[in-house]
Image: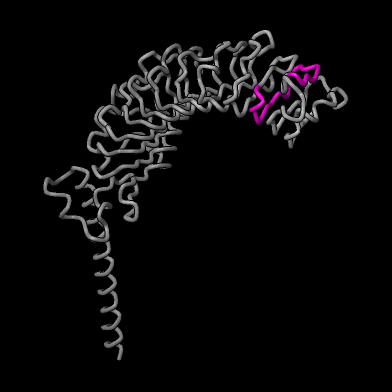
Amino acid sequence: MRGWIFMLLLARLVDFSMTQQTNSLTWLSYLRNRAYSHGHGRSHNLASLRTEDEPSVLDCPLECDCHPTYPEAMYCNNRRLQHVPFVPSHIKYVYLQNNQITGIANAVFDNAPNLAWICMHSNKLSSDKIADKVFAKLPNLERLFLHNNNLSRVPQGLPRSLQDLHMNHNNISVVPVNSFRGMSNLTALHLQMNAIEDLGNALEGLLSLTLLDLRGNRLKKIPESLPPKLSQLYLEYNRISSIPADFLSQRPELCFIRLSHNHLTNGGIPANAFNVSTLVELDLSFNKLERIPTISTSLENLYLQGNKIKEFSVSSFCRVVDTNNYSNLRVLRLEANEISAQDIPYEAALCLRLATNIDL
């Protein structure tokens, strides 16, 4: 009886040992196959290792994840990586954010010319450690995320295919005139929270740009050569003290302007600078205004809180006050100024008949 029990135990141990060995060998084989696909130890076709269930997993770098459900994406984010790993040729979307990468070596993306998105925000990228024109060989790149790094300048050789470029929260102070040359497909440019003092003519040629974010820089004037299709302009937290007279009249697409937290005074705003029919929203809050500037009757949202305004002038909103002439203003913010409800003349009710929110 004891002999049978001993034999059964021995059989189970042998079976367990073989199972463990098989699992270990299978796992080692899987890792080796992934390493081989990285270019180490073999030269035969990668396709021989692929299966129907894992069409793209086997050539995924060891540092990353490539989910078979999303065969065109490579997830390398939040891995404490210090370098850009090998990118397989079929990848279109690479996620490298929230790592410790300091530089981008030359030709690191050359094997994946179809890349459409590169997410490298929240790393430690330095401009001196990014190879010249490392992005130039990516003719299909549409979105490039480089925000929250240590960049001191715009990378060279950015592809003309780019549509969305994020370089906010860096240390960029100077933007050379040729930084965005030929990028006629760019629609959104994010440069907020840098140290830019003047853009000069760097924005020339951005024929498709609709959104420009320059918040939190050191600008002393409105940038020159603003793109013709620009519809959203964000300039909060700069040092702008005046507005050009033809600022809006030459840009019929510009609908949303934010100029809060600047150094604007009434003397720096020409009489009809904001009296244009295309403007929908205007933010002049937290400046040094003492009077309400003249605006168009088509404006819908006006923010003037945090200034030094001492009077409520109906003529700023309506040049003629009657049943047929009135403002389209819906929201008017005037709190934290030097006026109260008693300072508003009765004609304001007729002029601002569409207003749903007036804050004093």
Q: Is residue 169 visible?
A: no
Q: Residue, x 40% and y 22% (percent of image)?
A: 206
Q: Is residue 89 visible?
A: yes
Q: Quadrant of residue 359?
A: top right
Q: With respect to residue 352, does 60 lie above or below?
A: below
Please name whichever residue, 108 or 230, is drawn nearer the observer in this view of the structure: 230
Q: Is 313 situated left or right of 106 in this image?
A: right
Q: Give the percent coordinates (x, y) of residue 70.
A: 34, 52
By secondary structure, the bulk of the magenta-drawn segment is best described as: loop
Q: With respect to residue 58, does 325 lie above or below?
A: above
Which segment is the magenta one?
Answer: 296-315
Q: Give the percent coordinates (x, y) of residue 296.
A: 65, 23
Q: Give the percent coordinates (x, y) of residue 297.
A: 67, 25
Q: Is 70 situated left or right of 247 in this image?
A: left
* Image quadrant containing the C terminus: top right
Q: Quadrant of residue 90?
A: top left
